[in-house]
Amino acid sequence: MNTTTAPAALISEGGQTLLGGLNRVFHCNHYNAHLQMTVLLTKGLTKGLSTLNPEKLLIDAATPLIDILKNQGYTTEQLIDEFSLCGFGILQQSGEKIWETPSSHYGESIYSHGKGHKSCYFNSGYIQGIVNHKVTETECQVTGAHADKYEVADESISLANYLTKEFALTTDIPARFDFPECQTFQTQVDEDKILSVVKTLPLCGKKTEGATGLIDAFGVVLTNHFADYYNYISYETYNSLCKVGIPEEDNKEMFIQSGHVCAFNTFGGIMSSPEWYDLIEPTCKTREDWFHGMVAVINALGWGVYRIEKIVPEKEFIVRVYNSYEGVGYRRMYPPAKDKNLSFLAMGAALGLVHLLWKVDIRTRPTLTQKFFVEQFNNSNNSYSAEQTHAIATGDAYDRFIIYK
Amino acid sequence: MSTNNLNVINANHFFDSLNKKRKLGQQEEIENSLLARKLGILFAIKTDNYVNFKGDFIELTDYQLDALHDILDEYFNVELREEVHKLVMSNEELQKKIEKEEVFLTSHPQSTGKVKLVSKIKGFFGMRA
């Protein structure tokens, strides 16, 4: 479908990337798969929580976000275009009540450990937002169909916006290495240059003839996803699992592991890419420089502003995140939390970055296979632990993580 | 089969069998720590009881063993009845395990009360004092 509508403007604000006023964050198929798998663990959970239906949660979490975009003036054509632009695939209406995604991130790039099942929950929720009716996925590439198909029901749907609380981004963000607690670092890694170059990379899906609307980059398949979608499905699931008595450690580790998996695949892919070796590696003399380099790249992903506070190789690493999308998202949905350890993605990502450098040494260019993940990267030998000491979710000015041995 | 029977299984042997079966079926291997966490959560949801899969040994009643097979089929796409049956420790093996624990307890005077085996599956989420 050719359209003449102009895409919404991308705005960078306080480390977040806003499109249509909603923060978008880059994440890979591995993160999306692992997180979706974690949410689906609650299937069958009824004890005192009759409303929790993970499949419904995965679908319905997308719909209010589309409503927000529509309220801002998005047309159907713009929403269809943006579906591709953000790497979700190609979305098209093929009948009065039939939609399909001949190519889709969730239909092609997702994986699960169990039996294959229809997996394009997000896509269904996205279409629900467009048509204002209940949508059900009827065919999926995961189960062998040549395209994912969706049926629009007669039942109209109106889902409440879950971003019910006002919470402004902070503008009080220190410059890199410029805050009292920051260790003195000497590095040639130029974060501003890296940021400006990464922002020019064509990390968007296309819907021109023959295009897939997917974002193949750094050996993974990326999406520029709604941060609030991740936040809502994560915290609703986490809270539900807490209520039924799953030990906090097990519960948190499932979500943190999603970030750890993400770091292995996305950070690992980036630090093995030609772009990395062209732009960043030449400025890196030490392993610490690689750490600075990757954190600079992270600052272009919409995840917030990452600031390294301390590096004691082999012992301790401290990272702060201003405007972390998890912390900000939490405050826009819930009252302030008491628990500091709630920015699961950032915890897993920071831990994974330390593991990539100080555990498996990504500089030696290992092949990042599943076997390598299991036997080396994720092996408990020589592992570090992660703890969050400050949290925007609890009212702190920033998130702060300690990765330690 | 009585539902009160307690079946004790070596956790690492169980995870190895699971991954071996998955590999045979051309499915990817899953690391032990993730298996342990997923199984703990799934078990609590399916049976209303939390079972620790992160220790050296897994202890399951007959009823829980049935639930385990359902979970393995649905969430890990493996049929493992025969393998698990072989992994259930015999009375003789159990006796040896208990004796070993008693030795451990008597040689570690600070270890009192209920036996708790040291988990070999280290988590990565920490809370430092």
Image (cartoon, coloured by chain):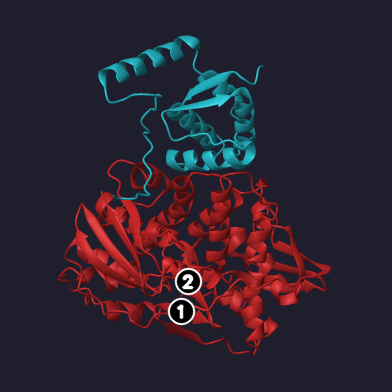
Q: Residue furthest top?
A: B92
Where residue A39 appears, as percent x and y from the top left, is: 58, 54
Q: Are marks 1 and 2 in contact (CB under 8 Å)?
A: yes
Question: Front-most of A274 and A95?
Answer: A95
Q: Identify the residue position indicated by label 2 in the image.
A: A25
Q: Residue furthest right?
A: A154
Looking at the picture, does residue A402 appear above or below residue A115?
below
Question: Front-most of A127 and A369?
Answer: A127
Q: What tint does the image give chain A?
A: red
Q: What tint does the image give chain B?
A: cyan
Q: CA distance from mark 1 to mark 2?
A: 7 Å
B57 with respect to B3 (left or right): left
Amino acid type for the residue under numbered disc 2: Val
Residue A111 visible in the shown view: no
Looking at the picture, does residue B126 appear above or below residue A23?
above
Where residue A370 appears, as percent x and y from the top left, is: 43, 47
Q: Identify the residue position indicated by label 1 in the image.
A: A17
A170 with respect to A117 (left or right): left
Q: Residues within 10 Å of mark 2 (few under 14, many from 20)?
A: many
Where residue A125 appears, as percent x and y from the top left, is: 67, 67
Residue B43 visible in the shown view: yes
Callout 1 and callout 2 share a chain: yes
Amino acid type for the residue under numbered disc 1: Thr
Circle 2 chain: A
Which residue is located at x 66 percent, y 86 percent? A3
Tell me the SS state at disc 2. Answer: strand
- Compare marks 1 and 2 and give the one earlier in the sequence: 1
Quarter location, residue A278: bottom left
Where residue B37 appears, as percent x and y from the top left, is: 48, 42
Tell me the SS state at disc 1. Answer: strand
Circle 1 chain: A
